[in-house]
Image (spheres, rainbow, N blue to C red):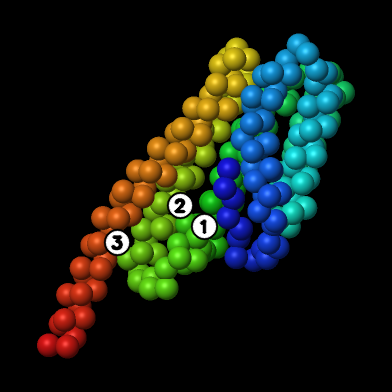
Amino acid sequence: MATPAPATDRPRKTPPLLAAVLLVVSLAYPVVVWLALGHVSPRWIALLLVVLALARAAVTRQSFWLVAAGLAAVLAAASALGDRWGPLKLYPALVNLVMLGLFATSLWHGPSVVERLARLRESHFPQAAIAYTRRVTQVWCGFFVVNGLIAVATALWASDAAWALYNGLLSYAAMGALMGGEWLVRRRVRARIAAADAVHGGASHG
């Protein structure tokens, strides 16, 4: 998942190739687990999980990835000690929990995560845009709650194939659909804000 940093964090720039490798491995994690079932000891995948989480934390130096790395280490230890797959299948749910914490915290302290990202591309940012980005951040919080609960349900009660299918494909498709829908709504909101600014600008000159 793409993970913006809080304003208090100062992530260092990650080399594009390294960032791409980490992203691909992160996205492929459910598929890797599914392919390894019955062929590889869970301890090896537990080691991969810890290395992946620590690598993300090391290259970004972002506090929420440090939290994720610590929690991932707990899951990996539980898996390695019991030589079982169950804890490893909870990692997608853990990522949703960390992302929920990041987005929700930004709503409490401000500015919201979506606002921070938008300000990287937009120089003009009126009050209406701030309200809109806050609402979008709230929508993402809801997404992480629902997606995380489904991730937990598939890890605990679904088959291995169903778990891999949802967490390795369907959840990303849902995320893409949400991003696409928000992009369409944003175009309309941006046009409405521009029209309102034009009216106000004309009135001030009149």
Q: Is there any visible trace of residue 67 in the rendered image? A: no
Give whichever of 31, 61 is nearer the camera: 31
Q: Which mark is residue 137?
A: 2
Q: Which residue is mark 1?
A: 113
Residue 187, position in %: x, y?
30, 55
Mark 1 surroundings within 10 Å by alpha-carbon count, few (fewer than 14), some (14 through 19), many (20 or more): many
Pointer 1 and pointer 3: residues touching (CB < 8 Å)? no
Pointer 1 and pointer 2: residues touching (CB < 8 Å)? yes
Mark nearest the camera among 2 and 3 is 3
Residue at 35%, 69% in the rendered image = 127
> Which residue in the rendered view is the most extreme toward the left?
206
User: What is the C-alpha distance between the residues marked 1 and 2?
Assistant: 7 Å
Q: Is there any visible trace of residue 3 in the rendered image? A: yes
Three-letter amino acid code at the position of disc 1: Val
The image quadrant of residue 118 is bottom left
Q: Which residue is mark 3?
A: 190
Residue 7, position in %: x, y?
60, 65
Comes first in the chain, label 1 or label 3: 1
Mark 2 surroundings within 10 Å by alpha-carbon count, few (fewer than 14), some (14 through 19), many (20 or more): many
Mark nearest the camera among 1 and 3 is 3
Q: Quadrant of the C terminus?
A: bottom left
**How many numbered circles does the render carry?**
3
Residue 21, position in %: x, y?
69, 43
- The answer to whether residue 51 is left or right of residue 170 is right
Q: Is residue 176 above or below residue 87?
A: below
Residue 18, position in %: x, y?
71, 49
Judged from the image, the secondary structure of the residue bearing numbered disc 2 is: helix
Q: Is residue 192 above or below residue 180?
A: below
The image quadrant of residue 84 is top right
- The answer to whether residue 112 is left or right of residue 85 is left
